[in-house]
Image: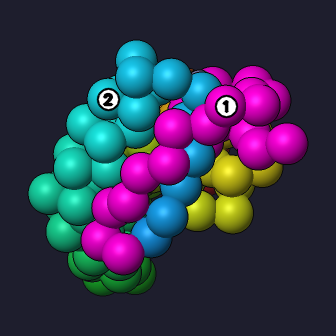
Amino acid sequence: MKRCLYCNAKTETPVVAKFENEKFFCCGEECLNKTLAFLEFAKRNTKYFLIGVIACPAVFMFGSLFPFSAGNNFIGSVLFCIGWSSVGLSLFAFPFATPQTSQLFGLRNAVRIVKILGIALIALTPLFWMMLRSG
Ligand SMILES: [Zn+2]
């Protein structure tokens, strides 16, 4: 019995599809279209995802060290919080889970999990701000 890549439901009559030579199964036409749309979206936006999750925080958080060491706590805190919230915003805007996670929970649930993680990270930003500003 196959599981639908999108909704994770077990299906006896799976629709077989291919994307970039990767074979996958869906329970029906609707899930298939949603999966293809998401895979296409992910393919187009992977570079922005990587910039937002890795490059941007690396630059801002590394950059925040200089104002901190120069005693400018305000600028340092601003840069750190920009770098941190960039990760959360990117996860929310581009909720790309690993293929393993998508297969385990289904694409729809994996997207939800990543979005919630993004919101959680964004919600932590004010906490960091207060910690940095009080220290
Ligand atoms: Zn389905």
**Which residue is at a point 49% across and 64% down the rendered structure image?**
23
Residue at (62% x, 37% y) in the render? 14
Q: What residue range appears in magenta?
A: 1-21
Closest to the camera, between mark 1 and mark 2, is: 1
Q: Is residue 76 magenta?
A: no
Q: Which residue is mark 1?
A: 13
- 102 or 84: nearer the viewer: 102
- 124 left or right of 40 in image: right
- The N terminus lies in quadrant: top right
Magenta span contains residue 15? yes
Dot 2 crowding, Cα within 10 Å, few <14, some 14–19, many 20+ = few
Q: What is the image's colouring?
A: rainbow
Q: Position of residue 130 (x, y in %)?
A: 56, 34
Q: Is residue 35 above or below residue 87?
A: above
Answer yes or no: disc 2 within 8 Å of ligand 1. Answer: no
125 or 45, nearer to the observer:
45
| Mark 1 vs mark 2, CA separation in Å | 16 Å
Quarter-of-image position of residue 12: top right
Q: Secondary structure at mark 2?
A: helix
Residue furthest left in the image: 44
In terms of image quadrants, where is residue 54?
Answer: bottom left
Residue at (76, 44) in percent of width and height? 2
Q: Position of residue 58 (x, y in %)?
A: 35, 77
Three-letter amino acid code at the position of disc 2: Asn
Relative placement, left or right, of 27 versus 101 is left
Observer able to see residue 58: yes
The residue wearing badge 2 is: 33
- Point out the residue furthest to the top here: 30
The amino acid at mark 1 is Thr
Residue 41 position, x and y percent, is 22, 45
